[in-house]
Amino acid sequence: MDQPDYFSVSRRGVLASGAAGLAAGSISPQVAFAASTPVAERAIAMQTVSMRINGKSETLELDTRTTLLDALREHVKLTGTKKGCDHGQCGACTVIVNGERINSCLSLAVMHEGDEVTTIEGLGTPENLHPMQAAFVKHDGYQCGYCTPGQICSAVSVLKEIADGVPSHVSAELTGPMEASNIEMRERMSGNICRCGAYSNIAEAMAEVAGERA
């Protein structure tokens, strides 16, 4: 009668056991603890952050993982700023912070202690439109409306960048005065994307505000 071969191991078995051991060894104690701990019992780091939003002081108690975009939309209820791709690729979430445009979906709210934040609601009102808002209406640059807040915030910042002499990839010179030319504005607005395709109208609106010819 044949005796069972207790030491016979297949190649597949060796590979499987080796992979399992490697995976087990690569899991840190912290990760293992987090995986075994119910979500309700895990500590959530909270922090108080104060900033000026559209000229008004706001103090918020936030989970430290909260983006500026979510803080504006969910906590301050300024829903004009839109969440598009949530990866910093479409520009729908563009706001102006300390005079410069940023993608608010890529920035944590706790990074903006004491900062001055301007959203589309802070640029103008239906009764008193910002010149860029009025130009978008005049030149039919409003697209579907979802991306428009980010487009307008970017457009305002683009003209400031040009006025301040900040160069772009298409600038002929790195120093000296910049011109609000069609190619300059198009290059600088390339981070704001929408399927509606009103880009030419947007360029015309920006040119009017800049006092240049599109």
Image (cartoon, rainbow, N blue to C red):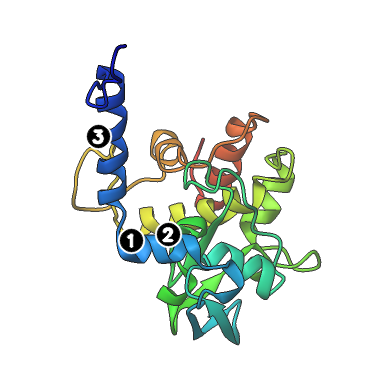
Sequence-first tag of 1 and 3:
3
Residue at 54% across, 82% down = 52
* Mark 1 residue type: Asp
Tell me: residue 16, above or below residue 27. above
Would you say 18 lies left or right of 211 here? left
Q: Are marks 1 and 2 in contact (CB under 8 Å)?
A: yes
* Mark 3 residue type: Gly
Residue farthest toward the right in the current orientation of the protein: 127
* Mark 2 residue type: Lys
Would you say 175 lies left or right of 149 here? left
Residue at 56% across, 70% down = 118
Would you say 11 lies left or right of 119 here? left
Check disc 3: other Cα within 10 Å, few if <14, some if 14-19, many if 20+. few
Reading the image, the residue beneath label 1 is: 164
The one of 154 and 193 positioned closer to us in this rendering: 193
Which percent across, then down, holds residue 86?
A: 54, 48
The one of 49 and 174 positioned closer to us in this rendering: 49
Reading the image, the residue beneath label 3 is: 18
Quadrant placement of the N terminus: top left
Which percent across, then down, holds residue 89?
A: 48, 41
Q: Nearer the viewer, mark 1 or mark 3?
A: 3
Name which quarter of the figure residue 132 lies in: bottom right
Sequence-first tag of 2 and 3:
3
Name which quarter of the figure residue 19 lies in: top left
Alpha carbon separation for disc pair 1 and 2:
6 Å
Which percent across, then down, holds residue 162?
A: 37, 53
Alpha carbon separation for disc pair 1 and 3:
61 Å
Numbered mark located on residue 160 in the image: 2
